[in-house]
Amino acid sequence: MWGHLRASSSMNKRVTSKDSMNADVEANSDLLENGEQEMTNPSWRYSCPHVLVATIVAFLFGYHLGVVNEPLESISIDLGFSGDTLAEGLVVSTCLAGAFAGSLISGWIADGVGRRRAFQLCSLPMIMGASLCATAKTLAGMLAGRFLVGLGLGVGPPVASLYVTEVSPAHVRGTYGSSIQIATCLGLMAALVIGIPVKNIVGWWRVCFWVSTIPAAILALAMMFCAESPHWLYKQGRSAEAEVEFQRLLGSALVKSAMLELSKSDRGDETESVKISELLYGRHSRVVFIGSTLFALQQLSGINAVFYFSSTVFRRAGVSSNLANVFVGIANLTGSIVALVLMDNLGRKVLLHWSFFGMALAMAVQVFASSGVASNYGAFYFSVGGMLLFVLTFAVGAGPVPGLLLPEIFPSRIRAKAMAFCMSVHWVVNFFVGLMFLRLLEQLGPHFLYSIFGTFCVMAVVFVKRNVMETKGKSLQEIEIALLPQE
């Protein structure tokens, strides 16, 4: 049951700096309510540079998802595990295991040292891990490097979602959230393009890993010049610094109104620690359940099986892997651009609902193509078309929306740790899909496997319709107040 905001007397629990700030914003609240101080949307130019730097994490996320796609065969030959599907699956999935470990601590890192330093910390294992992969002489060395990269990837994406949500004005927050998906898509495409010479140049796969150290280093350096999240600063009792960062992000005219919005959602208990039991059974357990289920259904749809093994699957269908990867990348980018345009117009729930519906339809096409009913010539076109439709519809909603929606619906007190918990669910499911996909494909056949993926897409459609709220155009404080459970 959802209730209303706790009585304003709970604000007295705040530290002195917040009491002082609240007195200031209360003095201005009457002016705001009477319309004497006109509210306008801030220019996107203030916050855009900070968001662009944060999306480097998403680029690296996409790059490392795809970096072993094309080179996997060459890596297996050079390191001596060619033909071992379990070892090939481990090269993919060890990174995901590391990401799971990183995601578990990402919330505590983000809350402990701030969003900017969390970005810098996540870049270090990505640099070290990529370097270890590039110089690996054995399978063990490759797996160790992939695990380190995964640690960085586990910390980075949740922090990026938090940061982009917290520094973005409400009227462009959906657009900025979609930019994370576009950056992920560009990272995937970059990995596929850089991997093209791998068949013709001996050892080129090592270059593929070295390349990833460049954006990771840029991220660590550029974050030194970016704004810290005002929401995090406010939670630390550093209201004066929060005002300075709001001025950088929104312009001086809207600082007071932004601080007033923060004070409205102040429940006086921000300094209390958040335990896992509270996320699972506490007053906010429902929104945590919604977030975890969304991420689980996103992965159970089978999308990362496409990204990890598209080269292998298309080769078995007689399609050039390079050509197939180009078309997959174009479909992903096209869908991401559509999401960028529509996110703040149609809203999160509409895109998410129709995205999963389109993915279910694409899986039905894949089942038909693999059933043997269609001719060989027709099955080829249905298979490729269904795969591209699947990627396109995923990128429109199921890809970008969960990472944007969840930081919006999580209260500020639990936001970082709840994101960490939900992302850990994401990585667990992702790990098993990456590890088992090729074996399931061999044992069950594509017909049955695609049927399973399609079933999960249908389940996601029903879940979104019944449980997801619309957050388009609302400030984080308005959303938090609307979702507060009754005391």
Image: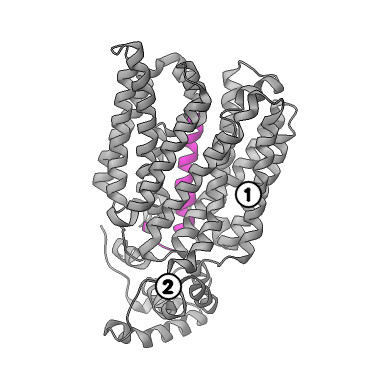
Based on the picture, tell me whether residue 414 belongs to the magenta stretch.
Answer: yes
- Left-right relation of 80 to 320: right
SS for tag 2? loop
Tell me which colouring the rendered structure shows. Answer: one colour
Query: Quick one: 334 or 433, which is closer to the camera?
Result: 334
Q: Residue 334: x, y in percent?
A: 40, 42
Q: Residue at x 39, y 31 (%)?
A: 388
Nearer to the camera, 266 or 155? 155
Badge 2 density bin: few <14, some 14–19, many ≥20, Cα 10 Å:
some
> From what the image shows, is residue 54 above or below residue 253?
above
Between the C-alphas of marks 1 and 2, the distance is 40 Å
Q: Is residue 287 above or below residue 91?
A: below
**Residue 275 visible somewhere in the drawing:** no
In percent of the image, x 64 and y 23: which residue is there? Answer: 199
Judge left or right: residue 136 versus residue 391: right
Residue that appears at 37% across and 84% down: 26
* Residue position marked by numbered label 1 in the rendering: 215
Label 1 Cα crowd, 10 Å radius (few <14 / some 14-19 / many 20+): some
Residue 78 in magenta stretch: no
**Callout 2 amino acid:** Gly
Where residue 32 sits in the image (x, y, percent)? 32, 82
**Residue 406: % across, % down:** 39, 53
- Quarter of the image for residue 222 reads bottom right
Q: Disc 1 marks which amino acid?
A: Pro
Q: Main secondary structure of the magenta part?
A: helix
Which numbered mark, 1 or 2, is in the foreground of this view?
Answer: 1
Q: Which residues are magenta?
A: 409-434
Can residue 384 be spotted in the picture?
A: yes
